[in-house]
Image (cartoon, grey):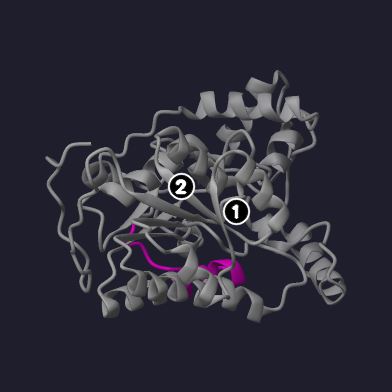
């Protein structure tokens, strides 16, 4: 992109340290979480652009597969500062995707070690290695239930579970550490992501396609998603734009809709009629609380839990004006096209 975009006023405390990537893109990039859904998509996009890519990988078996495809691999993890330092050698830009999502049975200390302390360890190692830019991938989940949708980057924080709480704390600590060490840092908060290769939205898509997805409550809660192709482009811009340093960006779609409308769209693309009835929320909320209490001590994923019930009642719509204005970000995949391609991938895997 060109450098003609005017940078808007930054938030208090931001350190605006403009860095411009060299002609032809950045030098070597490091991607953490490179075997996950978003990290692997970012890796493919960078390789496709001809960038020199290094992947930080925990599992040596997964490392072999990446090496076979021609990607440089560093074995390590977010708890091992020595492995981070080795991985960051001669790196220009870091895209930090690695985190612990929602896993039943993990102690809170594990979430803190990776999601809270990990980003700061990475920033410290980046300072020591002279890295030109760190792009920290957070989540719009730090805003929780959006009281006045659509939310912006300045909307209140309302994290609702340990994943969202630790992601918020990790983001805040990374920003503070970067400011103290003068490391150019950009924070990206992706909307819920979907697309071919994703499994997080599978229950919704498969449930609607098989006509086993009744809506709890009114279905009026607003919902945003971002297609994986748009997400990686937004993250790339955050890593290369001279206007991105010291800033936080929501990367999402320019479309959001009610849950009723989303289910109707998925049903239409799946060639089925959506279920016409809605179910009350409270019995499922109570059942979720009971299931969590029974299953958690045994490390068993409950068949229903309150966070999933809350999906039907909490608005998660987001405004991408800042990313559009400052990064030149422009989503290319319409929600309908994205739903269609995702359904096609689920069908090819035999899940729908």
Left or right side of 101 for 228: left
Q: Residue at x 29, y 42 (%)?
A: 25
Q: Quadrant of the C terminus?
A: top right
**Near-viewer residue (301 or 147):** 301
Q: Is residue 159 magenta?
A: yes
Left or right side of 337 for 153: left
Image x and y of residue 311, in percent: 62, 53
Which region shows up in magenta?
153-170
Q: Residue at x 15, y 59 (%)?
A: 9
**Near-viewer residue (293 or 283):** 293
Image x and y of residue 189, in percent: 42, 55
Residue found farthest to the top: 271
Left or right side of 316 for 13: left
- Crowding at mark 1 (Cα within 10 Å: few <14, some 14-19, many 20+): some
Image x and y of residue 243, in percent: 20, 52
The residue identified by callout 1 is 313
Q: CA distance from mark 2 to mark 1?
A: 41 Å
Q: Is residue 177 visible?
A: yes
Image x and y of residue 210, in percent: 80, 30
Q: Is residue 63 magenta?
A: no
**Element on which disc 1 rests:** loop
Left or right side of 77 for 22: left
Q: Quadrant of the N terminus?
A: top left
In the image, which is nearer the foreground, mark 2 or mark 1?
A: 2
The residue identified by callout 2 is 53
């Amino acid at each position: 992109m060109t450098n003609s975009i005017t940078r808007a006023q930054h938030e208090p405390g931001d350190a605006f340290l403009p860095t411009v990537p060299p002609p032809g893109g950045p030098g070597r990039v490091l991607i953490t979480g490179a075997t996950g859904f978003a990290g692997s998509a970012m890796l493919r996009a960078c390789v496709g652009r001809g960038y020199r890519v290094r992947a930080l990988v925990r599992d040596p078996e997964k490392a072999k597969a990446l090496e076979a495809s021609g990607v440089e691999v560093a074995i390590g993890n977010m708890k091992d500062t020595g492995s981070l330092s080795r991985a960051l050698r001669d790196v220009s830009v870091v895209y930090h995707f690695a985190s612990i999502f929602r896993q039943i049975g993990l102690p809170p200390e594990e979430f803190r070690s990776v999601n809270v302390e990990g980003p700061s360890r990475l920033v410290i190692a980046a300072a020591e290695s002279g890295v030109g830019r760190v792009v920290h991938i957070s989540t719009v989940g730090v805003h929780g239930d959006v009281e006045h949708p659509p939310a912006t980057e300045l909307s209140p924080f309302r994290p609702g579970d340990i994943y969202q709480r630790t992601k918020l704390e990790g983001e805040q600590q990374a920003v503070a550490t970067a400011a103290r060490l003068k490391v150019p840092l950009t924070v990206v908060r992706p909307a819920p992501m979907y697309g071919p290769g994703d499994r997080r939205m599978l229950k919704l898509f498969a449930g609607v396609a098989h006509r086993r997805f009744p809506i709890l409550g009114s279905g009026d809660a607003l919902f945003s998603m971002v297609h994986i192709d748009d997400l990686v482009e937004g993250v790339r811009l955050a890593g290369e734009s001279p206007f991105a340093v010291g800033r936080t960006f929501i990367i999402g779609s320019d479309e959001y809709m009610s849950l009723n409308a989303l289910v109707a769209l998925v049903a239409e693309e799946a060639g089925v009629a959506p279920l016409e009835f809605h179910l009350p929320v409270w019995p499922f909320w109570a059942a979720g609380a009971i299931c969590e209490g029974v299953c958690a001590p045994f490390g068993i994923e409950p068949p229903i839990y309150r966070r999933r019930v809350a999906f039907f009642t909490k608005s998660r719509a987001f405004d991408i004006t800042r990313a559009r204005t400052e990064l030149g970000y422009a989503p290319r995949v319409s929600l309908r096209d994205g739903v269609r391609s995702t359904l096609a991938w689920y069908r090819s895997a035999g899940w729908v």
